[in-house]
Image (tube, rainbow, N blue to C red):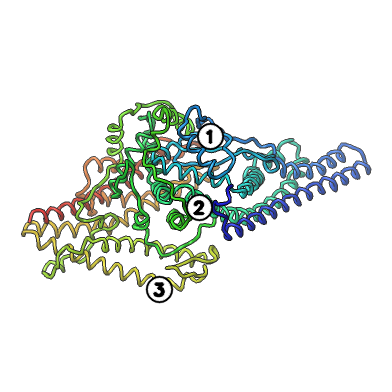
Amino acid sequence: MTDNLPKISSAYKTKLTSAIISVSIFFLLYFVLILVSLLLIFLLGYGAIKILMIKLGYFSFIAAIGLFSIGIFVFIFLVKFIFSKNHYSTRHLIEITPKHQPELFAIIDEIVSETKVQKPKKVFLSPDVNASVSYNSVFWSMFLPVKKNLTIGMGLINSTSVGELKSILAHEFGHFSQRSMKVGGYVSQAEKIIFETVYNNKDYENFILNGTGYAAFKFFGMISVGFINVFQYILKSVSNFLFKNHASLQREMEYHADAIATFITNPKEQASSLLRLELSDAAFNYSFNFYISSEQKYLPENLYKNQAALMKIFSERNNHPYENGLPKVDVEDLKRYNKTKIEIEDQWSSHPEVAKRVEMIWKNTTQNCPENHELAKNIIRGFDEICKSLTSKYLTLHSIKNVGEVIEDNDKFLALYNEKYPYYEMDSKFNGYYERHNPILENVESLINKSDSHGLADCFSDKKVSLVYEKVGIENDLLTLNQLVANPKVLKTFKYNGKLYKGNEAEILLPRVTKELETVKAELEENDQEIFQYFYNKADDQNKEILLNKYKKIAVIDREYDEFNQSINQFITHLQFMTVQLPFEEIRKHRATLLSQEKPFKQKLNEFIETSGYKDLLSEEHKNQLKPFINSEYIYFNNDRYLQTEVDSVFSLVNEYQVILNKTYTDFKLELLDFQAGLDKAS
C-alpha cells in the first residue's frame, strides 16, 4: 500500500481493537470449554476404570462405557465444526481472465498499481448487483495466508459507467489493503462454531439419545445433552458481543475502503454509483420476482435486459433524469420520502447508510481522476451472451425449472409486467401529493357554502408534498417510541432530531411527538379543505353534486377499509397452523379455533359484498370470487390428513379478498382525483 493513500482513522483503530478483543475472548472461552471437555474425558474415564476394577461384569461394563462416552460426546460436540463441509459453490459464477476481458483487467491492473496491493487470485462474474472480495474461509485459513478473490456482479456492470465501475472496484481493492480483513476470517470461523454447536446440533443430539437403541445408553446420552446445553448457552451468550463488535468494525472498513476509492478515482462517480445502487437492485429483483410469480409460465432469456427496462420505468416514476444513458439519483431523492427524526444505529449492520457514506465521500481527499461516462457493459466482450449464461445460472441457483415461454423481447416483458403489476399514474399537477395521502374530509358538506378558496398556487407545492411525508415520518416515530416504551431495555441510546436520549427516556418524547402529529394533520386537513373548495367552486351545479358525493363516498370506504383489513389480518392468524408441521391433536385444536372464527369473518365478508360502501364498486366477477366461501362448510382436516383443496381454497380466498379490497379502494381514489383534475381542465 502506497504511503500517500488515506490512513485508517482513529475510529477504525478503536473498532479494530474492540473486534480483536471480542474475537480473542470468544476463542479463549472456546479453548477453555475444550479443556473442560478433555478434563471430563479424563475424570469420567478414570471413573469408568474404577467401576471396572470394582467388579467386571455386563452391567459394570455398560456403566463404564456410558460414563466415558459423556466426555467423548461433549468433546466431539465442540470440535465437529472442523469437519463440516464447506457448501460454497462457484457454479453460478463465470471465471474470467485477462485473455477473456482485457479492458476490464486493464482497469483492475491500474487499481492494483495505484494501491500496491496483491492481485486477486481469481476474478469472477456473478449474476448479482454487487461486487465483493472473498476467500474460501476454512479452519486452516486462520493460520495460513490465503489469496482473495474478486467477484463482480453483472447487474452492477449493467447499471454503471466505466468510471463508476472503476470507483466500485477501487472500493473493493480498498478492502484488499486492509489487514483487518483477517479478523473477519476469525469471526467467520466463530460463526461456524456457533452455527454447528448452537443451531445445527439437533441431529447430533438425537444420535446421542437414540443412536444405540439401548435404554441404559439413553440415560447417559441425556446427561451428555445436559452438558452440551450448558456449553451452548455459554457460546450463545458471548456471540452477540462478538458479532456486534465485528459489525461495528465492518462499517469502519467500508468508510476506509470508500476513502481509498475516492483518492484514486473521484467523489462524483463514486457517489453516483452508490446512490443508484438501490434503484438498480430493485429493478433486477423485481424482474426476477416477476418470473417467480408467473409460476413457470414464463422464463427469462436475459434478466439484464429486463433490469435495464425496469430501471428506466422506475426512474420515470420517481422523476430521476437520465444522464449519459443512466438514471441520476440524488441524496435528496433518498431523503424526500424519509422524514423520520429518530436515528437508531443498526448494531448488526455491516454497512453504513448510503446517505452517510455519500456525505463522507465528499469529505475525502481525492486526486480527481477524469470521469469516464462510457457504459461499463460496452467494455465487456460478449456481454449479451454472458448475460444469457448468468441468467441461466441464476435460475439454476434458485432451483427454477427450465420450463415456460421464454421471453426474449423487452416490449413483451414490459407488457406482461404492467399487466400483472399495474401502475396507477396520477395527474402531474398533484405533484405526488396523493401518493401517500388520501383526500379524506369527514365533514365535507360543511365546506360547500364557503367561498374563501385562495386557489391552488400553494396546495400542491413541494412544501405541501413534504408535509405528507413528514406526517408519515412522525407516525413511524410514534410507533418506534411506543415500542421502546414497551421494551425499554432493547436499546441503550437513540437520537431524536439530533439529540441523544437513553432507551428508557422514550416516554418523555411521546407527548411532544403526538402534538407534532396533530399539528401536521391539521395543516394537511386545512390544505385538503382548500383543494376541495377550489375544485367545487370550479364545477357547474351537476359536477358540484358529483364531486361532493365522491368525497363523501371515499370518506366512508376509507373508514370501512380499516375494519375489513383488520378482519382479514385477524383471520389470517388462525390459518398459520396449516403452514407448519404439527402433531395431529394440536392440528385438531387449531382447527376448532379456526372454525369458530370463520363465522364472524364470513359475516364481515358478506357485509363487504352486500351492504358496505364498496358494494356498488365491486364488479360481478369480484363478487363471484368471494361469495362461494360464505356458503362453504370446510373442515380442512379429516382422517389425520389435510383436505388440500379446502386448504388451498381458503388461502386463495384471503389473498383475493385483500387484493380486491386494495384495488377497489385505489380505483375509486383515482376516479375521484381524475374527476377533480378534469374540472380544472374543463374551466
The image position of residue 48, as x and y in percent, is 87, 43
Which of the two marks, 1 or 2, is nearer to us in this view? 2
In primary-sequence order, the first of circles 3 and 2 is 2
In primary-sequence order, the first of circles 1 and 2 is 1
Q: Are marks 3 and 1 in contact (CB under 8 Å)?
A: no
Q: Secondary structure at mark 1?
A: strand
Amino acid marked by disc 1: Val
In primary-sequence order, the first of circles 3 and 1 is 1
Q: Residue 436, located in which quarter of the rendered image?
A: bottom left
Structural crowding at the residue carrying mark 3, measured as other residues with C-alpha within 10 Å and reported as few (<14), some (14–19) or many (≥20): few
Q: Nearer the viewer, residue 586 or 300?
A: 300
Q: Residue 54, located in which quarter of the rendered image?
A: top right
The image position of residue 519, as x and y in percent, is 31, 71
The relative height of residue 681 versus residue 323 in the rendered view (above or below) is below
Which of the two marks, 3 or 2, is nearer to us in this view? 2
Toward the left, the furthest residue is: 541
From the image, tell me which residue sits under label 1. Answer: 123
Q: Secondary structure at mark 2?
A: helix
State whether residue 474 appears in this view: yes
Amino acid marked by disc 3: Pro
From the image, tell me which residue sits under label 2. Answer: 259
Amino acid marked by disc 2: Ala
The relative height of residue 383 versus residue 332 in the rendered view (above or below) is above
Which of the two marks, 3 or 1, is nearer to us in this view? 1
Q: Nearer the viewer, residue 218 or 363?
A: 363
From the image, tell me which residue sits under label 3. Answer: 511
Structural crowding at the residue carrying mark 1, measured as other residues with C-alpha within 10 Å and reported as few (<14), some (14–19) or many (≥20): many
Q: Are marks 3 and 2 in contact (CB under 8 Å)?
A: no
Query: What residue is shown at x 30% (from left), y 61% (from top)?
Result: 466
The image position of residue 268, as x and y in percent, is 40, 50
Query: What residue is shown at x 37% (from left), y 61% (from top)?
Result: 339
